[in-house]
Image (spheres, rainbow, N blue to C red):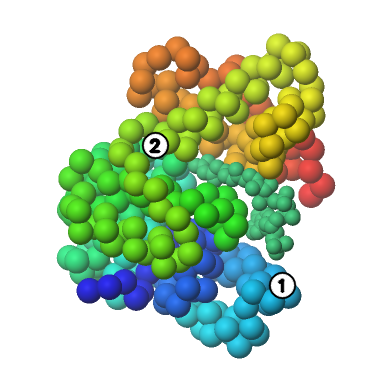
């Protein structure tokens, strides 16, 4: 059976973006979060994103309205019972994610596929916390989801080939380019990206250049759309630190040692754009 209805757990930055691209691609999406306030915020961001598409003539007003009727925000996990596919995009903590999947298990059909948008947690370990490890997979989207083409499709040790094929088809039908990556710490994306961001933080800590200088080098010399420190502020310094810790602890290799400046900034609550201050300051 092909996927028609998708559940998205978490209406934050990643969850609302995933829901937006899916309703735009014709899927009915049950968007779940814990409070009406969080859902309203996510649904508001989706409406704003689709309005932008209408303004830019990428979508007609009628298509936008149809897409919005396919969005079903809910605070009730049981409402996801009809979903063929569920993508979790909640806090990047193993226990929280595993708890979300366990809470869904009694409501969902056996054939429903569970996917996690985790950026670093082992898919094999998450899958083992569910009763359907063969129907479990990593689907790693990138921020901002409507703009970034890539989805890393990450089968765990027990993921069936049918599950992986369905995940690839879902990503393609949502207009993304899936790349299959085996389950390994940081997958490919964060194994390469996070050490660069971490090294940029070391350069700043050692006063090799100021933040703007470091970012300008990578933008002007390497043609990156954003410098590593700007990008860290976009991703969230807490997320960057958590991923560095996963790399450090998983590979047990000192080359992944989190930069002390990154740790200090996270302790101070300077998490980037979301708190108004990271390596740069942002108007509230
Ligand atoms: N949400 C939705 N759309 C956004 C957006 C957002 N947060 N930010 C920008 N856009 C859209 C803009 O609306 C604009 O679209 P239009 O065609 O409607 O104009 C388009 O993106 C380009 O934006 P801008 O012209 O304002 O700015 P830009 O050309 O500098 O592009 C950018 C902005 C797309 C964010 C670009 O700077 C970029 O690609 N940066 C790198 C982002 C990146 O590396 N993301 C991956 C992070 S890692 C991750 O997500 C995974 C992880 O596990 C940590």
Closer to us: mark 2 or mark 1? Answer: 1
> What is the x, y in percent for residue 207?
76, 13
**Seen in the image, is 178 located left or right of residue 241?**
left
Query: Who's the residue at 26% across and 39% down the image?
Result: 125
Q: Residue furthest bottom?
A: 62
Q: CA distance from mark 2 to mark 1?
A: 34 Å
* Total numbered labels placed on residues in the image: 2
The crowding category of the residue bearing disc 1, from other C-alpha atoms within 10 Å (few below 14, some 14 to 19, many at least 20), is few
As drawn, 205 above or below 187: above
Residue 262, percent across and down? 62, 24
Q: Quadrant of residue 184?
A: top left
Reading the image, the residue beneath label 1 is: 56
Quadrant of residue 221 within the rendered picture: top right
Q: Is mark 2 within 8 Å of ligand 1?
A: no
Going from N to C along the chain, the mark reached first, 2 or 1, is 1
Residue 215: x %, y % from top left: 73, 30
Give the residue at mark 2. 187
Q: Is residue 259 above or below residue 164?
A: above
* Label 1 element class: loop
């Amino acid at each position: 059976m092909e996927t028609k209805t998708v559940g998205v757990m978490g209406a934050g930055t990643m969850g609302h973006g995933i829901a937006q691209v899916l309703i735009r691609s014709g899927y009915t999406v049950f968007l779940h979060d814990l409070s009406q306030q969080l859902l309203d915020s996510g649904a508001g961001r989706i409406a704003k994103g689709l309005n932008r598409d209408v303004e830019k003539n990428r979508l007609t007003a009628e298509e936008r309205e149809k897409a919005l009727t396919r969005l079903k925000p809910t605070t009730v996990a049981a409402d996801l019972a009809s979903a063929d596919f569920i993508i979790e995009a909640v806090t990047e903590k193993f226990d929280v994610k595993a708890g979300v999947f366990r809470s869904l298990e009694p409501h969902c059909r056996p054939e429903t596929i569970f996917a996690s948008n985790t950026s670093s947690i082992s898919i094999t370990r998450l899958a083992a916390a569910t009763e359907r490890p063969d129907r479990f997979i990593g689907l790693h989207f990138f921020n901002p989801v409507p703009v970034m083409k890539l989805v890393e499709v990450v089968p765990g040790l027990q993921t069936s080939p049918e599950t992986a094929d369905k995940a690839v088809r879902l990503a393609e039908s949502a207009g993304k380019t899936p790349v299959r990556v085996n389950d390994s710490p940081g997958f490919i994306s964060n194994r390469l990206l996070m050490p660069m961001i971490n090294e940029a933080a070391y350069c700043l800590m050692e006063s090799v250049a100021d933040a703007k200088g470091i970012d300008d080098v990578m933008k002007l010399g390497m043609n990156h759309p954003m410098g590593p420190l700007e990008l860290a502020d976009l991703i969230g310094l807490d997320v960057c630190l958590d991923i560095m810790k996963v790399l450090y602890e998983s590979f047990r290799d000192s080359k992944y040692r989190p930069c002390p400046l990154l740790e200090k900034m996270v302790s101070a609550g300077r998490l980037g754009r979301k708190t108004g201050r990271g390596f740069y300051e942002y108007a509230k």
